[in-house]
Image (spheres, rainbow, N blue to C red):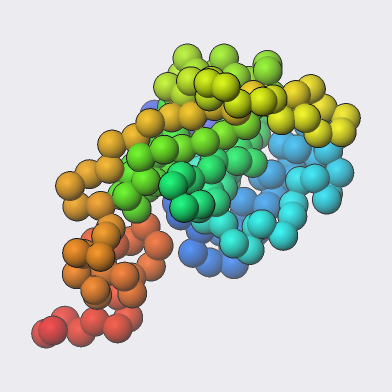
Amino acid sequence: MSAKNVIRSDNDIHVQVVTSPEQFMHAIAVRAICFMEDTGLSVHQTIDGNDYQATHFVIYAKDEPIGTTRLRWFRDFAKIERTGFRAAYRSARVLKRSADPVFDHVAKKGYNLLVTHAEPKYARVWQMILGFEPAEGRPAVVTEGHEPYIEMIKRLSPPADAISLQTDPKVLFRIEGQWDKPGAFETENA
């Protein structure tokens, strides 16, 4: 099935922060397709212990999972990794449409720096389409059996209402990415 037969408009594409076991399974399934089947990575290279300490996103075309990425959080930056799209959905348009909500999420958490490590053949995509730049003075990341990865950074501008210690404490109880929706610990009359 080709992407043009499935995606009728940008409105069909939406990005979800993973908040359920079903969504997590969608993320892992897409990643397995993209990394194990398409590139031949082992299961241990594709899925690792960091999956339980990360924020995952699933990109859907209507209800069909078509892409995924995960974020890990460090003191001064967030790291985007394990980004993959099913073959029929690999296009600059889908990538750009999917990336902006992820970037907004990182900025909303108050981060102004996003890091990734890209294979040389994809570094240009990260740079041209997503606005990353090669990290100055950083060594290439060498892993067994792969070309050296290029460290790339994207500078973000956190919004005025980024999550901080000045944020209403109730917001800190809310579900990841749903900071504008009252959570289970809030009552309608509170």
Horizontal arrangement in the rendering, residue 52 relative to residue 80 (left or right): right
**Quadrant that contains the N terminus:** top right
Q: Is residue 13 left or right of residue 3?
A: left
Residue 3 in which image quadrant? top right
Residue 110 can be seen, yes or no:
yes
Measuring 19% from the left and 64% from the top, which residue is drawn there?
166
Residue in the picture at 51% in, 52% down? 74
**Is residue 88 in sight in this rendering?**
no
Of all residues, the one furthest to the left in this rendering is: 189
Quarter location, residue 107: top left
Horizontal and vertical percent for residue 15?
44, 45
Percent position of residue 161, x then y: 19, 52
The vertical placement of 20 against 92, above or below, is below
Picture coordinates of residue 123, whole percent (x, y): 60, 19
Instruction: State which quarter of the image contains the C terminus.
Output: bottom left
* Count of marks overlaid on the render: 0
Residue for point 70% across, 50% down: 29
